[in-house]
Image (cartoon, rainbow, N blue to C red):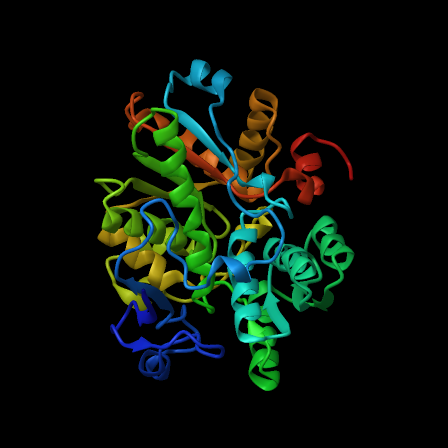
């Protein structure tokens, strides 16, 4: 099997080696105040194990920590209450750090081991940081994270507890992102930044393989709708990437409708999707984010162009929900299923609640729950009317 990176924008190909993140020609044309252009996709050729997930790093390089294979389960009370017999929850709160982001960190750590890299750096709103810190601890890697000082305390404590170096940033996620890139470029440390290192998307695609396999095992058919919380757009692109692989392998016939669920206070992708313009022009000028769903709070979606292209190619949909709707959904999900999800994950459920009457009751819907509510109890307390 041959692996290489392919630019999703211009089609240029590159070897998969440390230090290769962006397409040279597309990056030169990029307006730095717009979403990144030239983020690469990994492509593969040849036959593969019909039951395996094709990944560019061998199994022997992955660190000894149980990432992935999270439950897909039926929320029976919600099914009955909303007449939704094919509603499912993909529960990635069961990953070691309590976050979907472990999938990307797992592959990046394996790549680091394969190529002898000793240090990984990233910026994060919190979940990617605590995730990389956890997986890095298992792999014996040095992890440096640039994190907004306003990130929830639980996520900051996780980073430190796992032994990573935390650099608090008195500013936004976007500012932390730029600082992490400067450090990576200056020192040669491997960047794990979402939508910058293409391996993050390859790692995230594993969720699609699990969803399809679990539905087959349950005799439940194929996924028809998947509700995904969206900030940068990298999880969305990863989900699409997985389904693209599955279609190519012949394990499914149709691309599901992917719903990009965004907070009203951070909805750049939804605005771009509705724009009459294309490419960078669709995003317009950056709008400062303002939402309690910190994990999907971004001014400039770093994987915006890539995610927008996928939504348009496959006729995906967007849905925007308010913070009040997110908090209400968080409480309903907890009290009806026993699953306590953080606000960003609850945005996926809030999105489903908002559009469910437009989705036929007999169609299979997946809620992708990406993070534990214990990561941000301050927001949950706000939703309950409590002081914290």
Residue occupying image coordinates x 46% and y 58% = 232
For the point 57% across and 32% down, the residue is 330
**Quadrant including the N terminus:** bottom left
Coordinates of residue 134 in the picture (x, y in percent): 67, 55
Q: Is residue 231 above or below residue 43?
A: above
Which residue: 33% across, 82% down? Answer: 29
What residue lies at 41% left-to-right and 63% top-to-bottom?
A: 56
Image label count = 0
The percent position of residue 326, horizontal first and vertical second, equals 54, 37
Quadrant the C terminus occupies: top right
Given residues 134 and 283, the one toward you in this image is: 134
Image position, residue 116 (x, y; %) = 58, 75
Using the image, determine if residue 227 lies above or below residue 12.
above
42 lies left or right of 75: left
Would residue 205 appear left or right of 328 to someone viewing this image? left
Q: Residue furthest top?
A: 80
Q: Give the image quarter of residue 339.
A: top right
Q: Is residue 23 above or below residue 252?
A: below
The answer to whether 194 is drawn above or below residue 259 in the figure is: below
Query: x, y percentage for residue 25?
Result: 31, 83
Q: Is residue 302 visible?
A: no
For the question of whether residue 218 can be seen, the reply is yes
Residue 338 sits in quarter? top right
């Amino acid at each position: 099997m041959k692996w290489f990176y392919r630019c999703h924008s211009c089609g240029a190909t590159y070897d998969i080696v440390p230090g290769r993140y962006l397409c040279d020609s597309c990056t030169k044309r990029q307006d730095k105040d717009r979403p990144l252009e030239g983020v690469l996709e990994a492509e593969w050729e040849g036959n593969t194990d019909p039951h395996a997930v094709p990944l560019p790093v061998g199994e022997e390089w992955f660190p000894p920590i149980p990432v992935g294979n999270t439950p897909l389960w039926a929320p029976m009370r919600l099914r009955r209450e909303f007449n939704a017999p094919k509603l499912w929850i993909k529960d990635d709160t069961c990953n070691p750090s309590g976050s979907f982001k472990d999938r990307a960190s797992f592959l990046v750590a394996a790549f680091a081991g394969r190529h002898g890299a000793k240090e990984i750096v990233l910026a994060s709103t919190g979940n990617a940081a605590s995730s990389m810190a956890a997986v890095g601890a298992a792999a014996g890697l040095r992890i440096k994270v640039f994190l907004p000082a306003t990130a929830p305390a639980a996520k900051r404590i996780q980073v430190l507890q796992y032994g990573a170096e935390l650099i608090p940033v008195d500013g936004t996620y976007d500012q932390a992102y730029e600082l992490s890139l400067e450090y990576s470029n200056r020192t040669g440390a491997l960047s794990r930044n979402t939508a910058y290192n293409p391996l993050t998307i390859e790692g995230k695609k594993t969720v699609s393989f699990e969803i399809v396999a679990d539905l087959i095992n349950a005799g439940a058919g194929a996924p028809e709708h998947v509700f995904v919380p969206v900030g940068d757009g990298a999880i969305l692109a990863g989900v699409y990437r997985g389904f693209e692989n599955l279609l190519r392998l012949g394990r499914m016939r149709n691309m599901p409708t992917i719903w990009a669920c965004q907070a009203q206070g951070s909805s750049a992708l939804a605005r771009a999707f509705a724009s009459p313009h294309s490419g960078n022009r669709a995003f317009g000028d950056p709008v400062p984010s303002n939402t309690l769903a910190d994990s999907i709070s971004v001014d400039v979606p770093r994987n915006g162009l890539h995610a927008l292209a996928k939504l348009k190619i496959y006729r995906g949909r967007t849905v925007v929900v308010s913070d009040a709707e997110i908090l209400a959904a968080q409480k309903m999900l907890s009290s009806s299923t026993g699953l306590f999800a953080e606000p960003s994950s609850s945005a996926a459920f809030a999105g489903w609640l908002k559009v469910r009457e437009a989705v036929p009751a007999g169609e299979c819907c997946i809620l992708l729950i990406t993070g534990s509510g214990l990561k941000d109890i301050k927001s949950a307390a706000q939703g309950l009317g409590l002081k914290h």
